[in-house]
């Protein structure tokens, strides 16, 4: 069961980082391996936004699309992603954004997943691990461009 977790200090506010990560439609512009992201539905209730989104990831000749439910909770600066359909047996992804003492914030990123197919897991597994390590860099670079 591959997983990745990081706690990353950044010079931007928790609200700025939440907004950046919550803007899922922009992921194909800067996120490694993300070739497309389509929001199928968007519902707002009690100050929270619930998205159903399809994300297509690709590496060389391999392309996979998976569907997730994304809960955006700005009041708690939390984003929770639940797996619905695609090549995974399961996928659990969480983002948290907290204030840091120096005026910036700390990004807590966690992802745990397993592919349905052992073959796909073998082909994509190490690449996904590298990609998740690059995700926080990609978001931090994007934040520096937008909030500089």
Image (tube, rainbow, N blue to C red):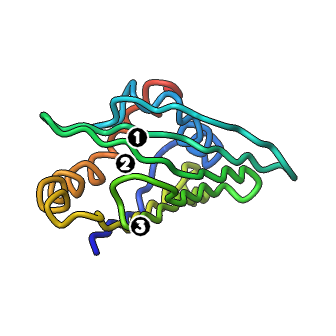
> Which residue does the image show at 65% across and 53% down from the upper left?
71
Are there few (<14), some (14-19), or many (20+) residues within 10 Å of tag 2?
A: some
Quarter containing the N terminus: bottom left
Work out whether residue 48 or residue 69 is closer to the camera in this orientation and state it. Answer: 69
Count of numbered tags: 3
> Which residue does the image show at 40% across and 40% down from the upper left?
140
> Which residue does the image show at 77% across and 42% down from the upper left?
43
Q: Which residue is mark 3?
A: 90
Whole-percent x and y of residue 60?
13, 34
Are there few (<14), some (14-19), or many (20+) residues within 10 Å of tag 1?
A: many
Residue 81's quadrant in the figure? bottom right
Q: Is residue 137 above or below residue 132?
A: above
User: Do labels 2 and 1 touch, CB within 8 Å?
Assistant: yes
Whole-percent x and y of residue 5?
37, 67
Whole-percent x and y of residue 61?
13, 34
Mark 2, mark 3: which one is toward the viewer? 3
Alpha carbon distance from label 2 to label 3? 21 Å
> Which residue does the image show at 80% across and 43% down from the upper left?
44
Q: Is residue 33 left or right of residue 25?
A: left
Seen as rendered, the residue at the extreme right is 46
**Which numbered marker is on residue 136?**
2
Whole-percent x and y of residue 98?
60, 59
User: Do labels 3 and 1 touch, CB within 8 Å?
Assistant: no
Q: Is residue 58 above or below residue 86?
A: above
Q: Which residue is mark 1?
A: 140
**Comes first in the chain, label 3 or label 1:** 3
Tag 3 secondary structure: strand
Tag 2 secondary structure: helix
């Amino acid at each position: 069961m591959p997983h990745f977790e990081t706690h990353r200090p950044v010079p931007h506010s928790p609200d700025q980082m939440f907004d950046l990560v919550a803007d899922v439609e922009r992921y194909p512009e800067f996120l490694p391996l993300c070739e497309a992201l389509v929001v199928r539905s968007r519902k707002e209730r009690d100050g929270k936004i619930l998205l159903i989104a399809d994300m297509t990831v690709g590496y060389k000749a391999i392309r996979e699309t998976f569907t997730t439910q994304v809960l955006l909770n700005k009041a708690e600066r939390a984003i929770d992603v639940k797996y619905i359909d695609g090549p995974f047996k399961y996928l659990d992804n969480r983002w948290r954004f907290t204030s840091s003492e120096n005026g910036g914030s700390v990004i807590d990123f966690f992802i745990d997943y397993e592919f349905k197919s052992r073959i796909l897991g073998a082909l994509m597994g190490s690449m996904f691990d590298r990609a998740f390590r690059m995700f926080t860099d990609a978001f931090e670079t994007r934040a520096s461009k937008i909030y500089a």
